[in-house]
Image (cartoon, coloured by chain):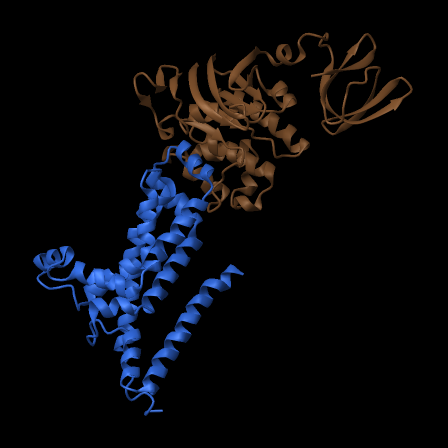
Amino acid sequence: MIRLSLKKTLLGSLGKFVLEIDFTIQENEFIAIYGKSGSGKTTILRMIAGLEKPEEGFITFKDIVYFDSKKKIHLPPQKRNVGFVFQNYALFPNMTVLENLEYAAENHRKNQIEELLELLDLYQLKDRYPNALSGGQQQRVALARALVRNPKILLLDEPLSALDPFTRTRLQEEIRKIHKYYQLTTILVSHDKPEVFKLSDRVLILEDGKICNVGKPQEVFLNRRTSGKYSFIGTIIDIKTVDVIQIITIETKGEIIEVVSSENNFSVGEQVLVSSKAFSPMIIKI
Amino acid sequence: MEKIFSNVDFTSFFLSLKLAFFTTILLLFISIPISYFLAYAKFRFKAFLEAFISLPLVLPPTVLGFYLLIFLSKNGILGSLWERLFGNPLIFRFEGILIASVVFSLPFMVHPLTAGFRSVNKSLIEASYTLGKSKLTTLFKIIIPNIKYSFITGIVLTFIHTVGEFGVVLMVGGSIEGETKVISISIYDAVESLDYTTAHVYSGILLIFSFLILLFVYLPNK
């Protein structure tokens, strides 16, 4: 169980704001922190990892105190045993895939490397240097490297934002698999609703440094406006007006579908939820 | 042919190389902590330290040499300490010009290294920390191997700058054969005594040597 109560003044694009959060994460839970860029999501992860120091508050993991401003405790990142996957992967360019993992491993964990190479399908790539890998492959190495030390907490900072939809979907499945297999407590920072929807047990919506909503992704994102029998999230790529109705083309995971709507307040690029009511599909803004 | 080389003595050339070699080695060790500190630490008087280190770039070598002469002389702080410890003076000695060269070439090593340290992606360093590695391990296993080129630049610039040194060495070391008479001083001496042939030989060697070293730096950069 991770308990957090943090306060820190951040400098956003619209000036200073205070990041102030207070929440508890259960063991083996998959939590997503969702919010616009600059809302303080990444800072939360960095504070848990020890890369940034909160002004006030505490962070505890089980009975270990990571940070406590009152007791003046601030464990350095080296002592927190947290797996951190950076947005830009942060693979060491001077080392091969295998060397990246070996660098991370303590001596007694060498067999863990073999297991991770197999699990993440990296065995053939083990002697390559990071710059000879695709984005998805680099991401898998970063994930494997974060896991070598057997952390109990896995922190993912927008890990899939730079990948194409196909690779993204595949990696989402792998992240979910790893989360279960290693019984991790995972915190994912993302601004991608479908991703949060797919992966997390609970989502925490962050706005201007404050938590404005917490709950299961279905509850938080769908607001219980639909039956939930069948629904998916997509992006509007085209809108054609025909008489009084609109034919809206929606892209979802590489598939393209057309939906008819009588409302005309949609715009291209918007994310929408497509679900069915009675028999015909309907789309709702999210 | 024999006539051309009649007054040529390679002692001063080797002395220059020896001076440059030791200066570079010493500066490498001194500059790693200084540059690391300048690149990553935040402190109030950083600008003062940076300005101080860069002074040799702008000061006339005679000014620097003059202060070093005072500092290294028998009555100077370092000179007197050295004499008490080792029993010999620093002025007009190889050790003296070595210390002077280290001071004089300091920015040529510190600047490329600091720029290199600053260029390392911060997340690489942070990734290393989250993987349980200390600052020292991170420095030697991650940071330094990724800025090899900055190190090569620093080493070459320092080396070549020391080989080409004149004013400071003359002020502190004078012109003692085999001890402080480096190649640039030999050229000066040759011209002074109107021995242009020898001056030509020394200058030519130095010109080709410097060019080849710089070429070695720029070639892989293509």
Can I make out residue A151 in this image? no
Count of numbered circles in the view: 0
The percent position of residue B101, horizontal first and vertical second, equals 27, 62
Between residue A82 and residue A213, name the one nearer to us: A213
Q: What color is chain B drawn in? A: blue
Residue A163 vertical placement versus B182 (above, below) = above
Residue A107 vertical placement versus B59 (above, below) = above
Between residue A84 and residue A71, name the one nearer to us: A71
Q: Picture quarter containing residue B7?
A: bottom left
Q: In the displayed structure, does residue A152 sit left or right of residue B60?
A: right
Q: Residue at x 71, y 8 (%)?
A: A225
Quadrant where the N terminus of chain A sits is: top left
Residue A105 vertical placement versus B35 (above, below) = above
Q: In the displayed structure, does residue A256 sit left or right of residue B162?
A: right
Q: In the displayed structure, does residue B34 sit left or right of residue A22?
A: left
Quadrant where the C terminus of chain A sits is: top right
Q: Residue at x 20, y 69 (%)?
A: B173
Q: Residue at x 45, y 63 (%)?
A: B217
Between residue A8 and residue B9, name the one nearer to us: A8
Between residue B66 and residue A52, name the one nearer to us: B66
The percent position of residue B84, horizontal first and vertical second, equals 8, 57
Q: Picture quarter containing residue B73?
A: bottom left
Can I make out residue A231 in this image? yes
Q: In the displayed structure, does residue A106 sit left or right of residue A266?
A: left
Q: What color is chain A drawn in? A: brown
The percent position of residue B35, horizontal first and vertical second, equals 35, 48
Residue A242 vertical placement versus A161 (above, below) = above
The percent position of residue B32, horizontal first and vertical second, equals 33, 49
